[in-house]
Image: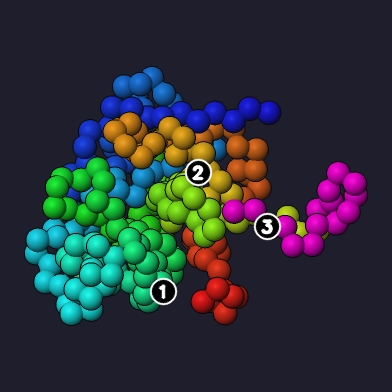
Amino acid sequence: MEVKIIGIEGIPLIKKGDNLAELILQASKNQNIQIKNEDILVIAETAVAKSEGHVIKLKDIKPSNKAIELGEKTGKEDELVEAIIEESSEIIKVGPDFIISETKHGFVCANAGIDESNVDKGLATPIPVDPDTSANGIREKIEKSTGNDIAVIISDTQGRAFREGAIGTAIGISGMKPLWDRCGELDLYGRELKTTSIAVADELASSASLLMGQADEGIPVVIIRGVPYFEKLRNVPSSIKPLIRPKKYDVFR
């Protein structure tokens, strides 16, 4: 079994109104890469947010009293803190240099997922308004152009509870299920699996991050090819929501 991770190079800096699907198709053609049946495309959320014009101008934000208070506690700029508050449904924990919140999408992450990297100074990109819809639109256009069944994952770089460092995390998906429930299957010793479910969308996003990087790599789109469970998990009306743990099961809040 072989799985390939292929970075698509040559995609220009994204601007508002850019057609990401067309840019991906053109860049892959220039690189002599054919998007094949059952390929999985992982796309950085910053590229999606910029193409959709979902960019924050920090200087245009007027901080609230709460933002100023949290800015003093965290050392963050008041305007950025206000943006975090506006993109959040709940502020969960505040530390000396971080704000953990639940975004309007239901993701629990640092700074509401707002990113100040890979954009001009004074700008920031929040998580796209509806990453599933964004993924679906890109998938449909590429499938129509290529005639192949593919999946699209929108990824973000996030930290993890009780672990240092950040990894690629899936925040939107189209074309396949994000979670693989393997309950009822047998292990190597014939025992039935009782509670095993695999966050395949996160695993794929994390593997793509190896090529995307976090600095000036300039690879916002990665193709993952040869995933053996694609057909099993193929699902067009998919959503990232199955990966979000219901709050009632969150024993740390």
Query: Disc count in the image?
Result: 3
Question: Residue 73, can we see it?
Answer: yes
Q: Is residue 145 left or right of residue 202?
A: left
Question: Residue 112, can we see it?
Answer: no
Tell me where residue 185 appears, x and y as whole percent: 81, 53
* Mark in front: 3 vs 1: 1
* Mark in front: 2 vs 3: 2
Tell me where residue 230 appears, x and y as whole percent: 60, 43
Q: Tag 2: residue type? A: Ser
Q: Is residue 115 left or right of residue 4?
A: left
- Give the labeled residue for mark 2: 206
Question: In this rendering, is residue 183 above or below 168?
Answer: below
Instruction: Characterize the magenta stretch by its predominant secondary structure.
Output: loop
Q: Please name the residue shown 49% across and 50% down the image.
A: 164
Q: Please name the residue shown 19% across and 73% down the image.
A: 68
User: Where is the N terminus found, in terms of image quarters?
Assistant: top right
Q: Nearer the viewer, residue 137 or 11?
A: 11
Q: Nearer the viewer, residue 175 or 41?
A: 41
Bounds of the magenta span?
185-199
- In primary-sequence order, the first of circles 2 and 3 is 3
Question: In this rendering, is residue 146 above or below 109?
Answer: above
Membership of 193 in magenta stretch: yes
Q: Which mark is residue 163?
A: none
- Give the labeled residue for mark 1: 92
Crowding near the residue tagged with mark 3, few <14, some 14–19, many ≥20 C-alpha atoms within 10 Å: few
Mark 1 lies on a secondary structure that is strand
Tell me where residue 45 appears, x and y as whole percent: 34, 50
- Give the labeled residue for mark 3: 197
Mark 2 lies on a secondary structure that is helix
Membership of 229 in magenta stretch: no
Q: Answer with the quarter of the image where residue 58 lies.
A: bottom left
Mark 3 lies on a secondary structure that is strand
